[in-house]
Structure formats: C-alpha cells, structure tokens
C-alpha cells in the first residue's frame, strides 16, 4: 500500500525553502491516498463480515455496545447535519454511556422551519442505514479507504458539538480507531473493516427501526406524532422500509449481484 507521507528524503530542506510547496505536496498525497482504488472485497470477505456483524449486532448487550455507540453517533450526526441544512441552530450533541444520545437544536423561524423540524427528527434513524449503504457501495467499488475516511471525518466533525467529556472521548476514540485502521499497511485490512462497518450500520439501523416501531414511547417517532398528528408507528414503518432497502442494496453491492452497474 502506498505511504500516506511518501518519501521523506530532503523534506526538511524542501520545507525550509518552499513550505507551501511541501504542504501542497502533503495535501495531494493525502488526497491521492484517500481516493485510491483497490480490489473490491471477495465473496468470502462479504460473507464473513456479515456473520461478524450479526454476532455483534443481534446477541447480548455486552458485545453489541460498541456497535450501538457507532449507530448512535451516526444517528445524532444525522439530526445535526439535516437540522443545520434547514437553518436550525444546533447547539450541541450528547452521547450517553447507555448508547443513547441527544442533539440539542433550536428551530430558527424561516420558511422551512416546520418541515425542517420534521425532516431533522426523521433523519436520525435514517442516517445509519444511508451511511451503511454508502459505505457498502464505496467498498464494493474498491474505495474502502475512501469509505473509512468519510466515517472518520464524520466522527471527528461531532467533536465541535460535543457537550460532555464522555461524548468527546467517544468521538475521539472512534476517530482514532478508524485512522489507525487506515494507517495499517496490510493487504485487505481496509476492505474487511469497511465491509464490517457497512453491515453493522445497516443491521443496527434495522434493529433500531424495529424496536422503535414496537415501542415508540419517548422516541423520535413519538415526537413526530406530536408535531404532525401522524401515528408514531407510521414513522417506524417508514424507517423499517428504508433500512430494508438499504440492507438489500448492501447485499447487492458487497456480494456483487450485478443488478446495477458499478462506478
């Protein structure tokens, strides 16, 4: 695998004579590394990572806690980003040790205030499924490194909104693990990890959508019911539908079913 930092010979002299040129070169190398294409994962990788994800997501709470943290991080990121796009003032994000979370946002009065509020509330449970499907697509086209960089950047972006020490520590830990995986110079490590993350996000999104449909009390579904008058289970079913589509697309991409052409 190509080195992110390239050849260090003469770096000190070059940096002294042309610091901007050296910085530009480093940025270009980082970009080339982040967008590099490799081999797509084999069927063995796709099947094994699916099995690992099922072990991590479905059984007891101890093993799935780490996956829940990632799911909650992406969930709250979805609330924050969509809220900001609709002009809401996002003041912070709190992640809790029980893998629950909360995004604090204030609805600014504008033409899209009401619809923005509903879309932002809906986007939380949708975000892990969308991110998981995107990760699967990138991985299937040989862009596992790009997928990991996107998830790492997503995690780090929440650091600006962290309002508790636990939230900041969890964000930094997630980012650190992903960066460490990116720097491992072992063939196929990135493809394995990217495929595993894709499965975990899609499966945890499906589990979350199912659970909130069965018991919507205190959830985004209940908030949407209060705001729109539409029953909470309608919103739960909408998330189940989205995650089902995302899960099917992830299967198509990672198992190379060739239903759609790849980029």
Image (cartoon, rainbow, N blue to C red):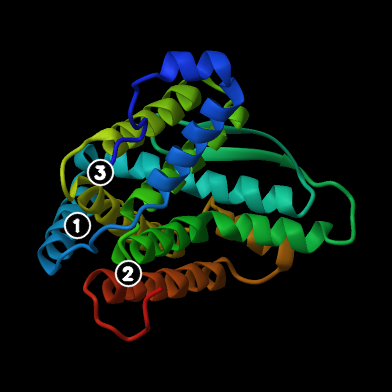
| In the foreground, 57 or 219 | 57
**Whole-percent x and y of residue 78?**
56, 51
Residue at the spot x=61%, y=40% of the render? 103
**Whole-percent x and y of residue 34?**
41, 46
Local secondary structure at mark 2: helix
Quick check: can you spot residue 34? Answer: yes
Q: How many marks?
A: 3
Residue 160's place in the image compared with 19, above or below, is below
Residue at the spot x=29%, y=31% of the render? 180
Q: Does the CB distance between marks 1 and 2 fall below 8 Å?
A: no
Local secondary structure at mark 3: helix
Quick check: can you spot residue 100? Answer: no
Query: Is residue 13 left or right of 67 when viewed as pictured?
Result: right
The numbered mark at residue 250 is 2
Query: Is residue 89 left or right of 48 when viewed as pictured?
Result: right
Q: Earlier in the sequence, mark 1 or mark 3?
A: 1
Residue at the spot x=49%, y=27% of the render? 167
The numbered mark at residue 54 is 1
Task: Classify the position of the C terminus by image quarter.
Answer: bottom left
Local secondary structure at mark 1: helix
Residue 206's place in the image compared with 69, above or below, is below
Q: Does the CB distance between marks 1 and 3 fall below 8 Å?
A: no
| In the foreground, 39 or 20 | 20
Task: Classify the position of the N terminus by image quarter.
Answer: top left
Q: Earlier in the sequence, mark 1 or mark 2?
A: 1
Mark in the foreground, 1 or 2: 2
The residue identified by callout 3 is 64
**Whole-percent x and y of residue 72?**
44, 44
């Amino acid at each position: 695998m190509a080195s992110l930092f390239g050849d260090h010979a003469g770096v000190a002299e070059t940096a002294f004579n042309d610091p901007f040129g050296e910085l530009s070169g480093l940025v270009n190398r980082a970009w080339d590394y982040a967008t590099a294409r490799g081999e797509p994962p084999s069927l063995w990788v796709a099947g094994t990572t699916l099995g690992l994800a099922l072990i991590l997501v479905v059984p007891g709470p101890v093993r799935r806690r780490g996956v829940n943290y990632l799911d909650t991080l992406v969930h709250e990121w979805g609330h924050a980003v969509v809220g900001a796009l609709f002009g809401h003032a996002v003041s912070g994000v709190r992640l809790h040790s029980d893998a629950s979370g909360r995004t604090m946002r204030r609805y600014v009065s504008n033409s899209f205030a009401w619809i923005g509020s509903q879309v932002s509330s809906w986007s939380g449970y949708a975000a892990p499924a969308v991110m998981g499907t995107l990760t699967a697509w990138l991985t299937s086209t040989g862009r596992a490194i790009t997928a990991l960089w996107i998830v790492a950047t997503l995690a780090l972006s929440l650091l600006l909104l962290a309002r508790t020490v636990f939230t900041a520590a969890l964000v930094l830990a997630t980012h650190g693990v992903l960066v460490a995986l990116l720097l491992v110079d072992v063939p196929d490590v990135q493809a394995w990890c990217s495929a595993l993350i894709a499965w975990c996000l899609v499966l945890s999104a499906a589990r979350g959508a199912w659970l909130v449909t069965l018991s919507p009390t205190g959830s985004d579904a209940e908030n949407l019911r209060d705001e729109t008058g539409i029953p909470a289970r309608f919103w739960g079913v909408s998330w189940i539908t989205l995650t089902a589509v995302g899960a099917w697309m992830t299967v198509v991409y990672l198992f190379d079913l060739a239903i759609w052409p790849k980029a």
